[in-house]
Amino acid sequence: MQFLTISEFSKEPNMVFSKLAHDGKIVITESGKPQAIMITVNTENFEQVFAFIEEIEKRFHVQEAVINDKERLLAFERLMQFHRKKSPTRFWL
């Protein structure tokens, strides 16, 4: 798998597409962090590959939502514990 910077991609796109044709996938980075993944597709597999990518995105967003919900619940529980210690008989939101 090749890693290329955004500036390499913008300066020499033909070179990038040559490497993509050879390696099958390239990771584009900015400031050393991955920003995009390029993969080869053709007319025969485009729809299948695109549907697969959409499925991955859905799973990723579902996992993000579950994590965010857990984080919110933990934060709420910590807040309740803090207020119980301060004022055990009442709780205000």
Image (cartoon, rainbow, N blue to C red):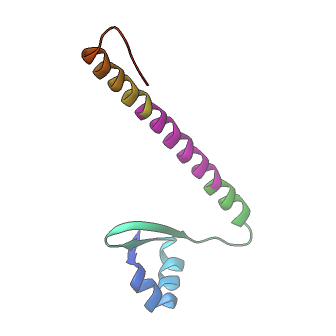
List x then y, in percent, for residue 52: 64, 54
Residue drawn at (54%, 79%) of the image? 21
- As drawn, is 2 to the left or to the right of 54? left
* Looking at the image, residue 84 lies above or below residue 53: above
List x then y, in percent, for residue 51: 69, 56
The N terminus, quarter of image: bottom left
* Looking at the image, residue 52 lies above or below residue 39: above
Which secondary structure dominates the residues rendered in magenta?
helix
The C terminus, quarter of image: top left
Residue drawn at (39%, 72%) of the image? 29
Q: State the residue in front, 81 or 48.
A: 81
- As drawn, is 53 to the left or to the right of 83? right
- Judge whether residue 37 is colored magenta: no
Instruction: Give the magenta range.
Output: 54-71
Residue drawn at (52%, 40%) of the image? 65
* Looking at the image, residue 76 lies above or below residue 91: below
Residue drawn at (50%, 88%) of the image? 13
Q: State the residue in front, 26 or 21.
A: 26
Q: State the residue in front, 61 or 18.
A: 61
Q: How many marks?
A: 0
